[in-house]
Amino acid sequence: MTITVGGPQFKSHAVATGVLALSASIAAIAQDAQTANENGVLERVVVTATRANKAIEKIPGAVTVITSQEIQAQTLVAEDLSQVLAVLAPSYAPSRQKLTSFGESMRGRTALLLFDGVPQSNPLRNGAREGYFADPSLIERIEVISGASAIQGLGATGGIINFISRTPRESGTRQRVELKYGIQGHAADALWKAGYTVEHKGDFEVLLHAGATLRGVGVDGSGQRLGLEAIQGDTQDSRAGDLFLKLGREFGSQRLQFSLNKFRIEGEGDWKPVAGDRLTGQPTGATPGTPPGQPPRNDVRTLSVDWTHADIGGGQARAQVYKQDFSALYGATTATTFQDTRLALQGKLIDQSEVVADKAGVKLSWVRPDLFIDGIELTTGIDWLSDNSQQRLALTDRTWVPPLKFRSTAPFAQLEYEVGAFTVRGGARYESATLDVDSYQTLAYYKNTAVQGGHRSFTQWIKSLGAVWRLGGGWSTFVSYNEGFGLPDVGLVLRAVNTPNQSVDKLISLEPVLTDNREIGLAWRGALGSLSASMYRSHSDLGSQIRVDAATGVGSVLRVPVDVNGFEFSGELKPARDWTLSASFARTRGKTAAQAGAPLDVALGARSQGPDKFVLAATWQFATTGQARLQAMRLQSRDINLGRTVGTAKLEEHFDGYTLADFTASVGTRWGEFGVGVENLFNRQYIGYYAQSNPAGTNDDLFAGRGRTVTVSWRRGF
């Protein structure tokens, strides 16, 4: 985390251990848990994703904090939070540059996305659309915990990513206007963005934000139109809007906060895709025209009420009540699975699916320091979650995935003991969950099979244990063990039932995924910089792998073991006061089985893990309010599972690696802050990682990446 506050910069990725999130990668110990104030005095960075305000060097887990300044710089390169994560979070896979996020994994597994602690992920029917839920201008910082964790509940088998919204920091009333324009030099490829924020801090706090974004259709490095992901969803040829309100009030040692965010992104419907050719390498393109049906869209509403008490029973209490309503409409298609000769001739029926997920929950926690004796801290609480998800076919009003009614209650407790140079933490969480599904009938493609509804219940103890040893001289080391809890894609399982006499309560595929993460690391921090390195192993006996039929494109869930080993490194060097050189490297190697009972000899594909990733950057603080950054990201080539198939599902993947460079600069003046960003500085022509690697890929999804794009911005506060 690079933070500049009127002075030198400090890098901060901290490692510690404990509270149910002991997935610690050394980045959490290694680097500064502190920032500089105006006098150059180091201050602690406090992180909230761990359920208690903790200084980053004491956080139980592998934590990377991405600051507001870094977000602003990276969104000058691309208005896409997944690209911010791909550059600044070592364990995050390459961005798809699309509305869909298939293939954007962490450490070979799935990350739990949170917005101010409210779950945005949809594990019951993972449509890979949850990454677009808010305007990036709203985000004050991003907290990333890498590795399996249960601290925030269900779904974090690969890690936790908590996007934290802005909060008024200075007394009085302030307003801010933001304008942004991106261009590649071709007609209809521009990005336009405008935003207005007003905030007040006094006896009460108010923050109101309204923003709108229009995106055209860009071009690749050769000047050809980029392909449109017409079915899964695209950010090109789209418009987005966000309205956000946050209210806060303090009452002595208590604080009450209310926030509401309404976000929508939808296609304009002015362009349609042009098929490419995988045999010749011709990328998928786009041409003006009107695609069938309604354009894809995301509609997300997030509401939360937070209460804190700084001194109750000698500790700090927290409570959050939340509600999240999510709807994702996919593009219209004559997919084989949608066909029903009772409604239209075979191959002529057009339909489009819609995933709807409504979540509500309560999170309660209490942190009591110096319990009985000095140095022992207790963290305890309970979480409750209600998730109602389904998938329907919007044009014909058919059920594809029946309503899934999931309920979960999870008490947890953790003890931490700090003595001298040692910190030891251990905790446990008890997940008790139920899933109820009414009787339903599958689509004609699945033989109109009647499936008897049923009730499933799961109980699972989830444990964590870890220790940090501060060796002196800036060195530290740690060892940790952590478990995470998840579910397979329940909707994908249930919609594909084609065998008679099946009932929900007898489908073994609904068993939960328990993932354990073991990790060891070493770090150093000194006056000239810092470095960190860690090795980890993540294993699940009953994993969840999606296999796609090469002939029909239909996916199914295979329950087989999954084993992931990885290595991560990050470091920085300050050769001069105003210069910072940084580097990171991540290597992930995952294995699974071709079928139940088979050996673990199948490499995880692009849907589950990214390639080796190497990022280099140089940052120059050329003025008190001015900064420039040059960065390069290298994705290594990858060839796996040569000649392997399972039935009609191809496993062989090929990826020709590439290197991309970007540049950003910003400077504050009395007329406002001006910024410029250049994505793909050398205009490299390339095909994206997932598009190249996908063994079920077609001529309709061979997507090239964006060519050189110049973005300018202006931001003025008053």
Image (cartoon, helix red, strand yellow):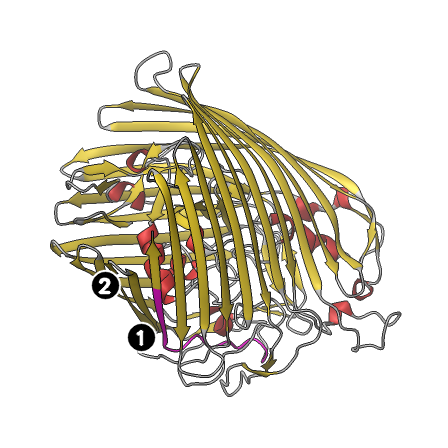
The amino acid type, in three-letter code, at marker 2 is: Ala
CA gap between label 1 and label 2 equals 14 Å
Disc on res. 681 = 1
> Which SS type dominates the magenta stretch?
loop
Between label 1 and label 2, give the one nearer the viewer.
2
Mark closest to the chain's N terminus, 1 or 2: 2
Query: Which residue is at a point 85% across and 50% down the rendered structure image?
Result: 501
**Residue 94 position in % (x across, y down):** 42, 63
**Residue 342 position in % (x across, y down):** 89, 70
Q: Quadrant of residue 447?
A: bottom right
Query: Which residue is at a point 40% across and 72% down the rendered structure image?
Result: 182
The amino acid type, in three-letter code, at marker 1 is: Leu
- Give the residue number, with chain letter if any, for mark 2: 628
Answer above or below: position of 373 versus 685: above
3 and 572: which is toward the camera: 3
Answer above or below: position of 524 versus 466: below
Q: Quick one: which residue is furthest to the bottom in this view?
A: 280
Horizontally, residue 695 falls left or right of residue 85, namely right
What's the magenta region?
699-713
Query: Is residue 120 visible to us here?
Result: no
Q: Residues within 10 Å of mark 1 (few under 14, many from 20)?
A: some
Residue 700 lies in the magenta-colored region: yes
